[in-house]
């Protein structure tokens, strides 16, 4: 049984909204771009790095990024929304950044992966701390009296 109190409970830091804006906007933008620029960041990119059925995979990942990005921006079911985003970032690092590390060394990988690691760690931060007081999670928690 899902513990809704845990899912919706959040730290009282107003500044969490800054991390939500960062994570939500980046994933929303990246998801939309997978459809707008399919050759360079969508199916074409997925095919280039060897992911299976790139058209379906890119559309699925893009859709997840859009939906979860919106949920994070709203602060709605934030802990649930960041789980697939964490999985996406771990996959991106494994499929695109580890090969750079092996081919070109640490500094090239560190430079090329700065956004990936920022999104990964920011998403983990939201998983641990929740959406903050300026969120729909907090409103739902207060209305349902789940404190």
Image (tube, rainbow, N blue to C red):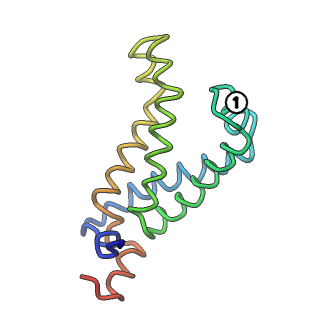
Left/right placement of residue 36 relative to residue 49 reads right
The quarter in which the N terminus is drawn is bottom left
Q: In the image, is 124 to the left or to the right of 30? A: left
- The residue drawn where x is 44% and y is 23% is 111
**x then y, percent, for residue 94:** 47, 29
Quadrant in the picture for residue 64: bottom right
User: 33 or 141, which lies in front?
Assistant: 141
Drawn side of residue 31 relative to residue 129, left or right: right
What residue do we see at 24% from left, 82% from top?
147
Is residue 147 placed above or below 84 in the rendered structure?
below
Which SS class for mark 1? Answer: helix
Which of 8 and 115 lies nearest the eye of the viewer?
Answer: 8
Residue 23 x, y percent position in the rendering: 46, 52
Q: Name the residue located 40 percent from the left edge and 72 percent from the top edge.
A: 135
Position of 56 with respect to 118 (left or right) is: right
Q: In this figure, which residue is indicated by the disc labeled 1?
A: 47
Location of residue 14 with respect to 113 vertically, above or below = below
Percent x, y of residue 53: 71, 38
Establish if 91 lies above or below 139.
above
83 vs 131, nearest the viewer: 83
Q: Residues within 10 Å of mark 1 (few under 14, many from 20)?
A: some
């Amino acid at each position: 049984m899902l513990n809704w109190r845990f899912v919706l409970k959040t730290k009282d830091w107003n500044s969490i909204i800054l991390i939500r804006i960062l994570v939500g906007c980046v994933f929303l933008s990246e998801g939309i771009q997978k459809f707008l620029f399919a050759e360079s960041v969508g199916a074409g990119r997925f095919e280039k790095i060897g992911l299976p059925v790139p058209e379906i995979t890119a559309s699925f990942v893009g859709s997840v990024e859009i939906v979860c990005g919106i949920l994070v921006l709203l602060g709605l079911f934030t802990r649930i929304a960041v789980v697939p985003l964490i999985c996406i970032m771990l996959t991106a690092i494994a499929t695109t950044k580890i090969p750079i590390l092996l081919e070109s060394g640490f500094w090239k990988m560190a430079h090329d992966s700065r956004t990936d690691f920022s999104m990964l760690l920011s998403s983990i931060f939201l998983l641990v701390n929740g959406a903050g007081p300026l969120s729909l999670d907090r409103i739902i928690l207060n209305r349902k009296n789940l404190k």
